[in-house]
Image (cartoon, rainbow, N blue to C red):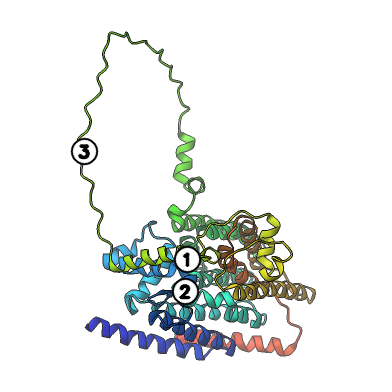
Amino acid sequence: MPFAIFQAVLTAAACYGVWRFARKASPIVIAGFLIRAFAAQILFWISWLQLPIARSLQLGRGFWFFAIDGPWYLGYAQELIARGPKALLFVTGHYPSRIFTQAFTLFCAAFGVVAPTAILFNCVAYLATCALIMRIGRSRKTLALAAIAFGPSMILWSLQPLKDTFFFLLIVAFVFVCYRWQEMWRAATAPRWTSLLGCAAAMLAIVYAISGTRWYFGAIVWGASAVFFVFAAAQTRRGAWTAVFVSQAVVFLLLSQAFRFGGDTDIPEKILNVLQPRTLIEAKAEPLPVPVPVPVPVSVPKTVAVTAPPPAPATAPVAAPAPAPLKDYLVASRKGFESTPGATAIHAGAAAARVPVASDVAATFIPRAAAQPLKLVRIGGGRGFWLLADFDTIVFSAVILFAIVACVRALRSGARITPLFLLVVLVFFATAGPMIYSVTNFGTLFRLRQMLYVLAAIAPLTLLVVHTDAREVNADVREENREGDDRGQAHL
């Protein structure tokens, strides 16, 4: 009982701190924060009290059908907390999305193993994402902040205990750290080794977290970072080219190990073997196999009796441990959901028939209400979510189109392509191609395409904008001076 009171006080203090932090943000960020906080609370109480509102979509205990993974993550948190700090610190590959599971379990340990903990967790991740966006580049941040704050899917996945909002934070955090790395090498003065080590350590930690949440995205980020490091080294204004390229190569090699340890058992064995230096060395040092002579079969006379070995004594089967009450609920909720008609339309793990490539592209960028009458797609189910899904498709395509137009206009106005811009574009296309042509279930596509949405929203910020307006130049100078004063006061 005393610990429950302590958790309640700690939760109240955390909510107050989050609100104080949100009040300092722009109106767009505040509006997105309030939408998430109030909508998540409303959905929780409707499901918890089992109110007669969309009863067929409720899973009970605060959960809804579009986030069937949520109860399982809460169950993982309960299990890890019961096993102690060591189990939480060394989460094995048995748990999906290990890094998200660790972070969410820490929140549950501090604020309680209940569904509303995800509301605080996702609000903190959302505010942190917006705060990092404000520090990337010198372009206007309105498009990026509005896309993050008001995207229908961005809001939907933040209303339940899901990993998406946390994963978007990791994407933006990696872009931010790469931006700081790029600016240090582009500066006229040599960067401090402490700053370089800090950025490199942050890159390693973020790639490790990305790979531990979605390993394939970690592989794409690591591969695209090779181009980023080459161009970041080429843009330096100093003459120590050897030291510059060597430092970039060392960080790239370390990122490969961060990806390997983060992805762990989720990474396919062939890729994992390539990233293990010990495996490569052993493969090169392994001697050639010596041919073994094949023995000649000998016929057995019919008079020789062959006796079979006695059968092994039968052992009684070991009884499985009884599941915890929460696990009983999780199993029952999943079975009940899977038996519901039309559940395969949104559920990420549902199977669907293979459709032509043109249909995959159409499902990604064209709303179903327009694509299905034209016979471009054939998607069933939906459970009344098609209005939201089609609206999200319109917003998704509009943000990508607007980002393309903003980048083209900026380049025509004198903006320069940066290594970070190349990194974002490469990751975007390397993610879009396999996802569009391999994902055949719309529920999975509806959720995974938000990675492209976030990348497109922040892509214009990664261009190097050359200001021609004296007022904007003075504003940038004042902002840099203010940040320098803040760092000086913090140092004192």
Query: Which residue is located at x 52 percent, y 55 percent?
Result: 253
C-alpha span from label 1 to label 2: 9 Å
- The answer to whether one can see residue 80 in this image is no
Residue 266 location in percent, x, y?
46, 54
Tell me the mark number nearer the camera, choosing from 1 and 3.
1
Q: 10 Å neighbourhood of mark 1: few (<14), some, or many (≥20)?
A: few
C-alpha span from label 1 to label 3: 41 Å
Q: 10 Å neighbourhood of mark 3: few (<14), some, or many (≥20)?
A: few
C-alpha span from label 2 to label 3: 47 Å
- The answer to whether one can see residue 449 in this image is yes
Whether residues under marks 1 and 2 lie with C-beta atoms below 8 angstroms apart, the answer is: yes
Relative vertical location of residue 46 with respect to residue 223 in this rendering, above or below = below
Residue that mark 1 sits on: 340
Residue that mark 2 sits on: 56
Report the side of 124 relative to 394 (left or right).
left
Corner quadrant of residue 375? bottom right
Residue 489 location in percent, x, y?
47, 88
Given residues 405 and 182, the one toward you in this image is 405
Query: Which residue is located at x 40 percent, y 71 percent?
Result: 104
The numbered mark at residue 314 is: 3
- The three-letter code of the residue at mark 2 reads Ser
